[in-house]
Amino acid sequence: MTNSSPTARRVAVLGGGISHERDISLKSARQVADALAAHGVDVHLLDPDAALLPTLIADPPDVVWPALHGASGEDGALRALLEFLGIPYVGSASDATRLAWDKPTAKTIVARAGVPTPHSITLTRDAFRELGAESVLTVMNRELPPPLAVKPAQGGSAQGVSLVSSDEELRRAMVLAYTYCDVALVEERILGTEICIGIIDTGDGPVALPAVEIEPRSGVYGFEARYNAGETRFYAPARIADDVAARATESALAAHRALGLRHISRIDMMIDGAGTAWFLEASVMPGLTETSTLALALDAAGHDVGWVYAELAHAALRGASHS
């Protein structure tokens, strides 16, 4: 990581929004704001509502940090508007964000880069209904039998995600996924060790942090397990062999680059019994709460969270000045 001093003196941290993940976003924004403030940055916390754009136009900050989860921060729309306004921001550009936000699209791009990703099928709500749920499920059961993972094609924090081991569970899982998105991703479930790898780039190229192993008490790393203290055990670094960790890191960096991500990302993966790392999805703005895996990974790498966040803000400002 670069050792240059941060020059982003005024940072607007965005938290909240109207997505299903509003509460988590508010917590992430507060963590970012506190960490930046502790390093001498003048921080302003803003909610992305109707007053946001007029506020940014009237008094532009040096950098915006969109600590937003869900559609309001990860579908690329807000970032595109910031680009129109010429305001630097931390995180991936709007076009890359759109690619990563859509899980089937991200899987396709990452698979073309040579990174393994589970066999899957993407189904719209309309196709599921018009072709007949029973007929669709019959074909799926023949070509993609359980165990499966069913998830909304867009979304985060494991909302709307189901782990399926039977036909009846699959029916319920499809209905649940469609309550969050009009498109569902049905994916072969890889059994093994769940890990995530955070990636940071403060200007010298992407650097992978130590892999964090995830062990939920319930066996399912769902919404509650992610954000309620004590529901999940995290191991940083992950309890996997060094060669397996090295290959997973290479795959995570390959996914980050293939999707065109920048500054910060989190790559979620499963390690199977043979030691193969399977790409599941990428987050362009990973959770930054007190229970987040990114904070654990930074600590495992010996980095001060506030210093890293300040460096990211500086990288955003420096990158804009060179564009």
Image: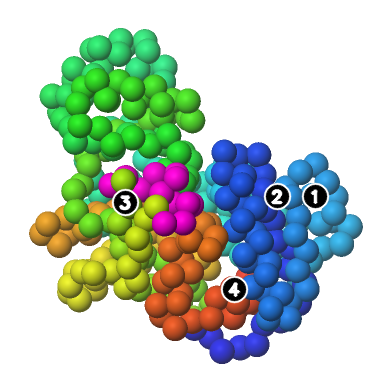
Q: Which comes sooner in the sequence, label 2 or label 3?
A: 2
Q: Pinpoint residue 145: horizontal percent, then vertical percent.
A: 16, 30
Q: Pinpoint residue 10: horizontal percent, then vertical percent.
A: 77, 72
Which residue, given by chain and number where applicable, does mark 1 sit on?
53
The circle drawn on residue 217 is: 3
Whether pointer 1 and pointer 2 mark residues with C-beta atoms closer than 8 Å, the reply is yes
Which residue, given by chain and number where applicable, does mark 2 sit on?
81
Q: Quadrant of residue 186?
A: top left
Q: Which residue sits at x=69%, y=78%? A: 38
Between disc 3 and disc 1, the foreground one is 3
- Determine the CA span between mark 1 and mark 2: 9 Å
- Determine the CA span between mark 4 and mark 3: 31 Å
Q: Is residue 226 in the magenta section? A: yes
Q: Residue furthest right?
A: 58
Please name the amino acid that badge 3 sits on: Arg
Between disc 4 and disc 1, the foreground one is 4
Q: Quadrant of residue 266?
A: bottom left
Q: Determine the secondary structure under disc 1.
A: helix
Which residue, given by chain and number where applicable, does mark 4 sit on?
309
Please name the amino acid that badge 2 sits on: Leu
Q: Quadrant of residue 45?
A: bottom right
- The magenta segment: 219-230
In this orientation, which residue lies closer to the viewer: 227 or 15? 227
